[in-house]
Image (cartoon, helix red, strand yellow):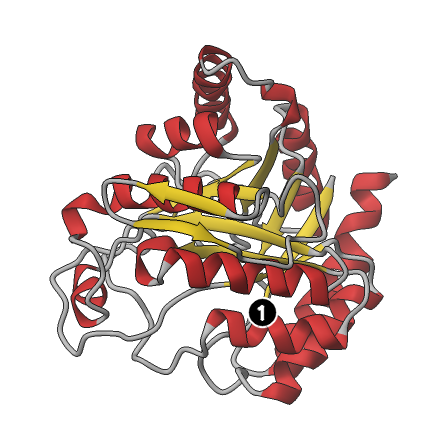
């Protein structure tokens, strides 16, 4: 099992010193990857339901640092840590410019970039950015991925799609990773599974829906569906990376039936949960150690690395 962690993108901990301190400590402790979320603006009032909290409200208030800016800073301050967008909302940005930025960061980081992508959920953010129509976001996401794959593998290139076109352009240098930086598809809807099967190098679901965990038995069902879809596309399911965001819960926050939530409780409990998810085919677990301060975040990270991981391995 590999482990990843989230870097702060907003709030009092989202400073240069804070981000770099957490990234460097995660690298020192041997964690595999650092995740960077993606938001650009937040509406003052929103009718869009956020799928990962009980009240359907996103906790952000508009103070998010931009994803690629964080990636560049962290890439220059670390040597081994994988850098993952979790997830980049593809319709927000011009696809050719995004392809260039990803390729450039891959080259400058020494081939450490993983592109986690999603179609987005915040309609008002789409409108503020003058992005393609919200109700077309899935089709746009698929087309942007197709553009990336072309621009990362051939030069010159031409494309004539439903939403975007270009002719006889060079977009170099190509990424350092071959054939290109891995693309992880976020989400656990059927559309996300289909997109993973067709385009993805990995599947990256958030392991909580309305603040309840996605349990192992439900993950098994999703993985079997993904296997069937991948094989129907003529692709190798075993080549996919399964990366699962696993919330760490307080022990006093049980499930509605009163039982313990996965990834809560004592180190032995969490280690057992990790072993269960390893057994069903998850390759990487992503934990969110972010607290109200960097000191608190680092303390949580160190606790996990020293008290939990050795129990899994031993």
Q: Is the residue marked by circle 1 packed among few (<14), some (14-19), or many (20+) residues within 10 Å?
A: many
User: To which quarter of the image does residue 16 belong?
Assistant: bottom right
Reply above or below: 198 against 90: above
Residue at 62% across, 64% down:
104
Reply above or below: 11 against 40: below
Q: Name the residue under label 1.
A: 7
Q: Which of 12 and 151 is in front in this view?
A: 151
Reply above or below: 118 against 292: above
Residue at 47% across, 63% down:
37
Residue 196 image position (x, y, % from top left): 46, 31
Locate residue 46 relative to residue 212 in the image: left or right. left
Residue 78 image position (x, y, % from top left): 77, 71
Q: How many marks?
A: 1
User: To which quarter of the image does residue 80 belong?
Assistant: bottom right
Q: Which of the image's four quarters has the C terminus?
A: top right
Locate residue 118 relative to residue 29 in the image: left or right. left
Q: Answer yes or no: is residue 39 visible.
A: yes
Q: Residue furthest right?
A: 314
Q: Nearer the viewer, residue 87 or 162?
A: 162
Residue at 75% across, 61% down:
81
Q: Answer yes or no: is residue 213 visible.
A: no
Q: Nearer the viewer, residue 193 or 312?
A: 193
Reply above or below: 248 against 259: below
Residue 10 image position (x, y, % from top left): 45, 79
Q: Which of 70 and 170 is in front in this view?
A: 170
Q: What element carries label 1?
A: loop
Residue 303 image position (x, y, % from top left): 74, 64
Locate residue 141 relative to residue 264 in the image: left or right. left
Q: Which of the image's four quarters has the N terminus?
A: top right
Residue at 58% across, 20% down:
237
């Amino acid at each position: 099992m590999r482990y990843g962690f989230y870097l702060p993108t907003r709030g009092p901990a989202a400073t240069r010193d804070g981000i770099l301190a957490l990234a460097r400590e995660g690298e020192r402790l041997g964690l595999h990857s650092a995740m960077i979320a993606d938001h650009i603006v937040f509406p003052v009032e929103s009718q869009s339901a956020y799928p990962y909290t009980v009240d359907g409200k996103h906790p952000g208030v508009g103070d998010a640092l931009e994803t690629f800016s964080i990636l560049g800073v962290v890439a220059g301050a670390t040597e081994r840590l994988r850098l993952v967008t979790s997830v980049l909302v593809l319709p927000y940005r011009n696809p050719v410019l995004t392809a260039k930025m990803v390729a450039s960061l891959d080259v400058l980081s020494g081939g450490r970039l993983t592109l986690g992508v999603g179609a987005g959920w915040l309609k008002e953010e789409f409108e503020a950015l003058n992005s393609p129509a919200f109700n077309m976001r899935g089709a746009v996401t698929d087309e942007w991925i197709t553009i990336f794959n072309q621009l990362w593998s051939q030069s010159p290139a031409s494309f004539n799609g439903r939403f975007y076109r270009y002719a006889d352009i060079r977009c170099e240098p190509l990424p350092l990773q071959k054939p290109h930086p891995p693309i992880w598809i976020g989400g656990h809807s059927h559309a996300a599974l289909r997109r993973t099967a067709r385009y993805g190098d990995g599947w990256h679901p958030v392991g909580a829906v309305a603040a309840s965990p996605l349990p192992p038995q439900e993950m098994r069902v999703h993985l079997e569906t993904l296997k069937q879809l991948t094989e129907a596309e003529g692709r190798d399911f075993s080549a996919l990376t399964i990366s699962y965001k696993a919330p760490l819960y307080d022990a006093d926050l049980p499930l509605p039936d009163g039982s313990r939530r996965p990834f809560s409780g004592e180190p032995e409990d969490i280690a057992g949960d990790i072993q269960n998810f390893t057994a069903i085919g998850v390759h990487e677990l992503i934990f969110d150690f972010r607290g109200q301060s960097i000191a608190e975040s680092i303390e949580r990270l160190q606790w996990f690395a020293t008290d939990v991981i050795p129990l899994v391995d031993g």
